[in-house]
Image (cartoon, rainbow, N blue to C red):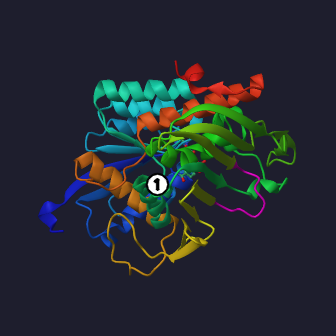
Amino acid sequence: MSASELSTVRVAVIGAGLMGREVASAFGRWFALLDSDVRPELVGVCDVNPEAIKWFRAIPGVRYFETDPAQLLRHADIDVVYVAVPHHLHENLYLDVLRSGKDLFAEKPFGIDLPSARRVRDEAARLGRFVRISSEFPFLPGALRALNYAREGRLGRPIEARCAFLHSSDLDPNKPINWKRQSRFCGEAGVMNDLGMHVAHLPLRLGWKPDHVFATLQRVYTQRPDGKGGMTSSDTWDNATVRATATIQGESVPLCLEMKRLAPGETNTWIFELLGTDGGVRFSTKEPKTFWTFQRGSDQLWLRTDLGFGTPFKTITGGIFEPGFPDILQQMWAAFFAERKGTLGSRVGCATPDEAVAQHELWAAALKSVAERRCITIAEVSS
Ligand SMILES: NC(=O)c1ccc[n+]([C@@H]2O[C@H](COP(=O)([O-])OP(=O)(O)OC[C@H]3O[C@@H](n4cnc5c(N)ncnc54)[C@H](O)[C@@H]3O)[C@@H](O)[C@H]2O)c1
C-alpha cells in the first residue's frame, strides 16, 4: 500500500486498563499489516487514575494525557474514541463521545443493560456516527472458517449449535473482588455482560436470532476477599447456560450459549460448534491450529485441518504461523477502520450496535427466565 493511499485516523482511548493498553500495542505494530488502507495514530489517553496513564507516556505520538474524559473530548484533532471502562460508565461516556462529534469503538457489553444499549444505539443513529463494538474472536482463522462453513449450507439438516466462552480463574476463592464481580458495576446480567458478546456475535451475524430462551444461572462464590484483609459480597452471576431455540437454515434448532467464570481448566476458551445431518464444524481456541469438519458418507468422519495465519487482513507473518490474542485484536481494529472508510468489502466486520442490543435482549430474557422459572420469548423483552 503506497503512503498516498493510506488515510490517517487519530484515535484516543478512555480507560487505560487491561484493554486500553492492548489497543496501544495493536497500533504500535500496525506496520505488520500489508493491506490496511488506514494508519491509526494513538494521540490521546484518559483515565481517572493518573497511575494508569503513566504507561502511555512511553508511546510515540500520544500528546493528550487527561484524567477527565470531558477534557479529552474537547480536542478537535481526535476522530475516533475507544472506551474501555467498567460497564456502569458505558452509557454516559459513549453518549459523551458521540455528542462530541467523534466516532466510537465501544467495549462490550455496550451499556450495562438492554435499555442502556438501546439509548446509545439510537443516539448514534440520530447523530450519524460510526459505532462498532469490540468482539475479536471472529477474526481468528478457525472462527472465520466456521463462519464461512455455516454460510455455505453444507450441513444437511441442522441439528444443533453451541457457542461457549469459558474462564476458570474464579475457581480460586482467594481471588480478590473487582468491579466485574459486583452487579452495580458489571450489571445485573453478570457473566453474560462480561462474556456474552463473544458467544452471541457469530450466531447473530449468521442470522440465528433466537426466538425463546430458558436459562440456568449460578452464583458459586458469593463472597470474595476485599483486598484489605476482609471479605465482601460478590453478587454477580458466575456461570450462565442459556438454552435458546433459533432458526438455522429455516429449521428451529437448539442453540446453547455458555458463559462461565468457573469452568475447570479453561483459561480463555472460545468454542463454536454447529452440527447437521451431513456436515458439521467444531473450533475451539483450546486447539487454536485445528479446524474440525464432519462428513457423513459410508463412514462418518471428523476431519482435522491444520490452520495457519489465515487472517482477513494480510500481514508480514508467515502463512504457517499461529495467530494469538494480540493478532486478532489488531485484525478487529483493521476491520473497524476499513468499514468506517467503506473499504471492508466481503471481509467480516465488527459487532454492530444492533447486534449488541440483540445480545442484551438474550441476557434480559435469561434473567427473566431465571426469575420466573420459565421459558421466555425474545418478543417479551424486545417490545
Ligand atoms: N474485548 C475483550 O476481549 C475484553 C476483555 C476484557 C475486558 N473487556 C471490556 O473492556 C472494558 C474495560 O475492561 P478492562 O478489563 O480493561 O477494565 P480495567 O479495570 O482493567 O480498566 C478500566 C479502566 O477504566 C478506568 N476508569 C474508570 N472510570 C473511568 C472514567 N470515568 N473515565 C476514564 N477512565 C475510567 C479505570 O481507572 C481503569 O484503568 C469493559 O467493558 C470490559 O467488559 C473486553
User: Is most of the magenta stretch helix, strand or loop?
Assistant: loop
Q: Amino acid at mark 1?
A: Ala
Q: Is mark 1 within 8 Å of ligand 1?
A: no
Q: Is residue 170 above or below residue 352?
A: below
Give the quadrant of residue 144. bottom left
Dot 1 corresponds to which residue? 150
Q: Residue at x 76, y 38 (%)?
A: 217
Is 336 in the magenta? no
Is 265 in the magenta? yes
Q: Residue at x 75, y 29 (%)?
A: 370
Q: Depth check: give the residue in front, 310 or 55.
A: 310
Give the quadrant of residue 35. bottom left
Q: Residue at x 63, y 53 (%)?
A: 165
Magenta span of residues:
260-268
* In-image side of 376 versus 117 (left or right): right
Q: Depth check: give the residue in front, 25 or 194.
A: 194
Q: Is residue 188 above or below residue 194?
A: above
Q: Quadrant of the N terminus?
A: bottom left
- Find numbered disc 1 in the image and state the secondary structure of the residue it sits on: helix
Q: Where is residue 273 drawn, in percent x and y? A: 59, 57
Q: Where is residue 109 drawn, in percent x and y? A: 54, 39
Extreme residue in the left direction: 4
Q: Residue at x 60, y 49 (%)?
A: 159
Q: Is residue 297 visible?
A: yes
Q: Depth check: give the residue in front, 226 or 206.
A: 206
